[in-house]
Amino acid sequence: MSGLLALLDDVAGIAKMAAASVDDVVGQAAKAGAKAAGAVIDDAAVTPKYVQGFEAARELPIIWRIARGSLINKLVFLLPTGLALSAFAPWAIPPLLMLGGGYLCFEGAEKIAHVMRPHHDHPEDAGGKKAAGDPRHLEEEKIEGAIKTDFILSAEIMTIALAAIPESTFWMEAATLATVAVMITAAVYGAVALIVKMDDVGLYMSANAALGPTRWLGRKIVKGMPWVMRLLSIVGTAAMLWVGGSIIVHGLAELGWHAPENFIHHQAEIVSHLFPEGMVGFGAWLTKAVMDGILGLALGIVLIPIGTKVVGPIWSRIFAKKKTGAHG
């Protein structure tokens, strides 16, 4: 009997330790996720523009496919890669992140270039064939582009989260990163789904609400959502440049060149004191974000000809060969 009681006591002790470990994982994941809040906001701002122009019935399926791709990015590719690099080649993390930052700068600058030069789109768009001929093909391209962009932002999120996790065992770090990946993906794409379906919510309210003020609010939501989507598209583009520029600046500092980071920090300190006392921190953050964004735009403009004339065609040929081989 005493042996059975001792066994039960041991089982209870193990259960308490397991519960404590789960609490630790969730707690560390919450703290790490908070550290990556800036990149999370950027991710949420960037994604809605990928569902613009599609039928309402296709919006949630597209978001779900992007969310699934985002989770695969984080759990299948980035989590094991991040843990392996952190353990065996930490020196490789800054250059890889800078490569991703350069891609974000290129994406953001290219979108601004398309707005500034709307008549210089791809030749196949001139006759409207590509835009109107195959909606399924356009949808696949949008989803693929969204998942590529998400990969860069997810890499930033996972790297920040990994750096924020206290040093512990391999499995604790892996469990915490996996929890961060699931929590952040659910939060980001839940918010994105809510944003893009708000016009349907407003339409339902305006047609079915019992109270006049509620119907009025529904009509205002329907009228306001196109402006909200345009604003989010602008914020998403700005976020690409801001995050991309900040990755480059931080990466240069990690590689030993601190001048750009020190310059931006110094200017942020000067400008922040022009703000009211309670907004000094916000002033410093805003100044840094603007300067990072300007740097990101400048770098992106330089990368546009490289990306469109060199990298893009090579990338297209590689994937065209893969698709041909797969169909063959």
Image (cartoon, grey):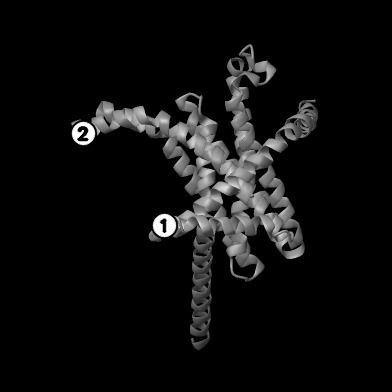
Give above or below for 121 relative to 156: above
The tag on residue 279 is 1
Q: Residues within 10 Å of mark 1 (few under 14, many from 20)?
A: few
Q: Is residue 186 left or right of residue 73?
A: left
Name the residue located 70 percent from the left edge and 33 percent from the top edge: 304
Name the residue located 73 percent from the left edge and 34 percent from the top edge: 307
x and y percent of residue 309 in the render? Answer: 77, 29
Q: Amino acid at mark 1?
A: Met
- The residue labelled by disc 2 is 213
Q: Residues within 10 Å of mark 2 (few under 14, many from 20)?
A: few
Residue 39 can be seen in this image: no
How much space separates mark 2 and mark 1, taking CA atoms?
A: 36 Å
Q: Quadrant of the C terminus?
A: top right
Q: Amino acid at mark 2?
A: Pro
x and y percent of residue 216 in the render? Answer: 24, 30
- Tell which of 6 and 102 is nearer to you: 102
Q: Quadrant of residue 275?
A: bottom left
Q: Is residue 249 left or right of residue 187?
A: right
The tag on residue 70 is none
